[in-house]
Amino acid sequence: MFKSDTYIQRRKDLVKHLGSGIALFLGNDESPMNYKDNTYHFRQDSSFLYFFGVDRPGLGAIIDVDSDQTIIFGDEHTIDDIVWMGSVPSIADQASHVGVKTVLPLEKLVGTLGQALSKKQSIHYLPPYRQDNAIKLHKLLDKKLPDIANDWSPSLVKAVISLRAHKTDEEIQQIEKALRITKDMHLAAIGLAKDGLTEAHLTGAAHGVSTTANVALAYPMILTVNGQTLHNHFHGNTLKKGQLVLADLGAESPLHYASDITRTFPVAKTFTNQQKEVYEIVLKSQLLAIDMLKPGVRYRDVHLSACRIITEGLKSLGLMKGDTDEAIKNGAHAMFFPHGLGHMIGLDVHDMEDLGEKLVGYDSKTERSDQFGLKSLRLARELEAGHVLTVEPGIYFIPELIDRWQAENRCAEFIDFEKLKAYRNFGGIRIEDDCVMTQNGGRVLGEPIPKSIAEIEALRN
């Protein structure tokens, strides 16, 4: 936990934003894999962590703006719980550490909310992303279950986003703690790769680093020779010389702040000339994007500038052609770069997207496109000091997508499908770093993780 003043101030700031009513926060419960007592790794709700910091299942909390009262609800461990799971600090002790004086049994939450409803107080809650919490809200608020998904509080969501979007120095320190572990995860994978090993060998080595550091993964690892599949969680392929390995790995900090880094490296000791040419385009686009980060700049414009570099680079290889601006306007580059340049990162790897991706990543000045590729841009809004975000351009050769576009004669005036045949088995390249916005511009967080061709090849040798 942070110091109690941190949590007290966060709740005070929320009260100022909200104005009136009761803010209701439900923590997460244990989630069974296949029977009640065999559970997945527990992860507390991020907004609950942000305002209350208590990292255990079975909790709820309210901030009563009207009466200036904060209560955490939960049940202490019984002797049976202790026999199976050991002793833990009391909820009261943990609540005291975050500046909450009142702790009540979980059953009291029903009556407390019932009294508030009878007084016609507004009950604000966040959109539930877990079905068990949706059912709880249905019972606690006496709402029809289908209505729960739609009746969440816009004012609470906007307040939470406005607070969580701007990271403090102590939050940045947590992200950089995670990045130190993530760097070692990547170095382990890059150093181990060789012909004949499976992806699982590299995945196991990287996961072992985070396990040894006693922290969880921020998200399921992507480590694959099929980097053209953007979210590829299969680890059963055998590495072969001539292939590229795309490793998208990130650890959490002890307080659950995420990191998110991608590196791409050859199974062989060196890149092939073809791989070098594509890699340099991706790296150039990433470095340009990082250099563009400044308060007031729309991330959509940074994304489109990266697209321009990628298009020009692919034109130099003969894979694209025609006017660059027209190619981008028509989305031709998206066959090679079908995702957005990045997203917010913090207590979630895709920070706060459970509250609504558009509310987090867009603003009143920025409309979301419905064009293939550009519609997948998760962060497009004007950047502000304190934002932490990923910068992750890529180039991918997706055979199924190439075949579809060629059959449809789509963007044929901008793409040379004949020359693309030599790249069908290329895979994909992505390079990703985490950056914080300061008043003066963007700064790459964490210790440098090798990403130039020379640095990667030095590690491979």
Image: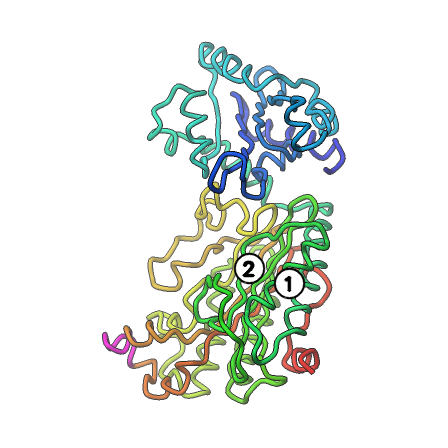
**Residue in view at x 73 percent, y 45 percent:** 170
Quarter occupied by the C terminus: bottom right
**Residue appearing at x 53%, y 21% in the figure:** 22
Position in image of residue 124 (x %, y %): 48, 26
* Image: 15 above or below 305: above
Q: Secondary structure at mark 1?
A: helix
Q: Position of residue 259 (x, y in %)?
A: 63, 55
- In the image, taking residue 262 as reference, residue 402 lies left or right, namely left
The span picked out in magenta is 405-412
The numbered mark at residue 110 is none
The residue that mark 1 highlights is: 206
**Residue at the location (54% across, 43% down)?**
40
**Front residue of 85 and 412:** 85
**Height in image: 117 above or below 251?**
above
Q: Quadrant of residue 176?
A: bottom right
Q: Badge 1: how crowded within 10 Å, few (<14), some, or many (20+)?
A: many
Mark-to-mark CA distance, 1 and 2 = 9 Å
Magenta stretch containing residue 172, yes or no? no
Q: Residue 204 in the image: x percent, y percent?
A: 61, 62
Mark 2, secondary structure of its residue? loop
Specify which label sits upstream in the sequence, 1 or 2. Answer: 1
Q: Mark 2, residues whose alpha carbon is within 10 Å: few (<14), some, or many (≥20)?
A: many
| Residue at far left of view | 408
359 lies above or below 312 = above
Q: Quadrant of the N terminus?
A: top right
Question: Vertical placement of 188 versus 173: above or below?
Answer: below
Give the amino acid at mark 1.
Answer: Ala
Rendering quarter of residue 128:
top left
Q: Nearer the viewer, residue 333 or 396?
A: 396
> Contact, CB < 8 Å: mark 1 with mark 2?
yes
Q: Residue at x 34, y 62 (%)?
A: 371
**Which residue matches tag 2?**
221
